[in-house]
Image (tube, rainbow, N blue to C red):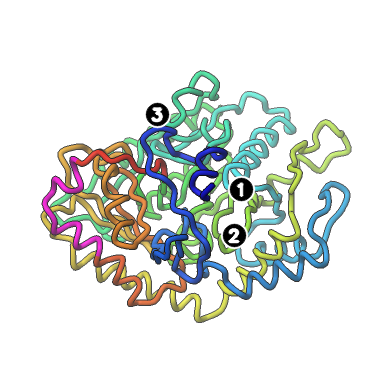
Amino acid sequence: MSLLERDKKSIWHPFTPLKGSPEPLPLVRAEGVWLYTEDGRRILDAIASWWVNLHGHSHPYIAEAVAKQARTLEHVIFAGFTHEPAVRLAERLLQILPNGFSKVFYSDNGSTAVEVALKMAMQYWYNLGLKHKKKIVALDGAYHGDTFGAMSVGERSPFNAPFDDYLFDVEFLDFPACYQPFCCGGKKDKPQRCGQVAATLQRFEALAQTGEVAAFIYEPLVQGASGMRMYSPEILDQLLHIAQKHDIICIADEVMTGFGRTGRLFASEYCLHKPDIICLSKGLTGGTMALGVTACTERIIEPFRQEDIMKTFFHGHSFTANPLACAAANASLDLLLRPECMSRISAIAQAHLDFEARIRDHRRVRDVRCMGTIFALEIETEQQTHYFNEARHHLYNYFLDKGVLLRPLGNVVYVLPPYVITGEELQMAYAVIEEMLNEPAKTSDTTHNNAPGQQ
């Protein structure tokens, strides 16, 4: 029985319809930015395998760190025990995170990092006896994960419709879109949406004044899954100012934007106001192993420092602070903080800007934007820009057939590569995008071959 036959018989893939989807590609190995299939194909991974891979696949430095740790301590319960990889990683993260963070709490992935943050925020007010502060505020279009708390603070969409009756209520603010050069590089003929931004700020102020808002959760500067939508740090600073003025806990979901993706180590660095809690995952281990981190300030910790056992933060995971994952994360940080890595991040950002200038006025480009290593363009179609835009049905396979892994979000095509990508390899990704743009519109807009789902 072939690998594909065995897969079909036994595996349920994420975000993939069980009927009508193309067969998955069997991979035998990966190196750098390249994926190698069982039948000998070579595919350029231009999206860092769901945004997690920072330093290229099968990086020998990270692999050796994991192997060395596996020969020393592979895992131990983290309640009542500790170990050097976890302590070292926590110390290092607290040194590079925006000022003010005091402790890290380990979990398994981005969704659980968000769950931890939400529970921390809610129990903070519970421990203080302020049980009227129960409301959570989030931004429309948000995606924070697929566990129930994370779904609750994310956009209500077909992805979570079956669970809608089980999600807790959240106040959603309109996304503060603003076509300013810094935030999205929008076309000159597109107006600034200052009125929309003002309305968003006014609504948040009104909600905050009730005294019932416990926390504000947001993806700083870039909403990933909703189409790499970008907004300016000036606008985010105004939202954070309102929150902090009214004693609202601010939670930054940097699962996607962390570790250099926006050009700085963390997107929160662009803002004057900093969050109380920050969620990390994806690039944390360089894409090698699953690991999540929720870091918080001393302010959040203080109400938990009590002898009353009922004020304890009763949360944990079987694989909390797994030593292998922590070792991978420490090795990834070693690579990330090297000057040559930051130089590559800058080079990718400049290449994105150059490509943006080249295609900005193309007749089939509705919008184009980039920030740091994130590049995104909206294809002009008869439908609105949305994840379920029909363009997605063709684009994924179109690019894959040309040897490039680009996983469009509806009619939004984005490039978010590993940092080790060369200029020549990056131009390959750009070239297939330009080739698509220069083909007849019907090629990417009306074909209905199914492609895999979200993100």
| Residue 342: x %, y % from top left | 48, 75
Asked whether 1 or 273 is in front, the reply is: 1
Q: Could you tell which of marks 2 and 3 lies nearer the N-terminus?
A: 3
Residue 283: tell me if it is visible: yes
In the rendered image, the residue lying farthest to the top is 165
- Is residue 356 or residue 328 the one in the foreground? 328
Give the dominant element type of the magenta stretch: helix, strand or loop. helix
Mark 2 surroundings within 10 Å by alpha-carbon count, few (fewer than 14), some (14 through 19), many (20 or more): many
Residue 435 falls in image quadrant: bottom left
Which numbered disc, 2 or 1, marks the residue that appears first in the sequence? 1
Question: Where residue 89 is drawn, which disc sits there?
Answer: none
Residue at which label 3 appears: 158
In percent of width and height, residue 391 lies at 24, 43
Q: Is residue 276 magenta?
A: no
Name the residue type under label 2: Leu
Which of the numbered marks, if any, corresponds to residue 284? Answer: 2
CB-based contact (under 8 Å), mark 3 and mark 1: no
Q: Residue at x 59, y 49 (%)?
A: 279
Q: Amino acid at mark 1?
A: Asn
In this image, 89 relative to 385: left or right? right
Figure quadrant of residue 346: bottom left
Which disc number belongs to residue 109? 1
* 6 or 147: nearer the viewer: 6
The residue located at (64%, 53%) in the rendering is: 291
Bounds of the magenta segment: 432-446
Q: Residues within 10 Å of mark 3 (few under 14, many from 20)?
A: few
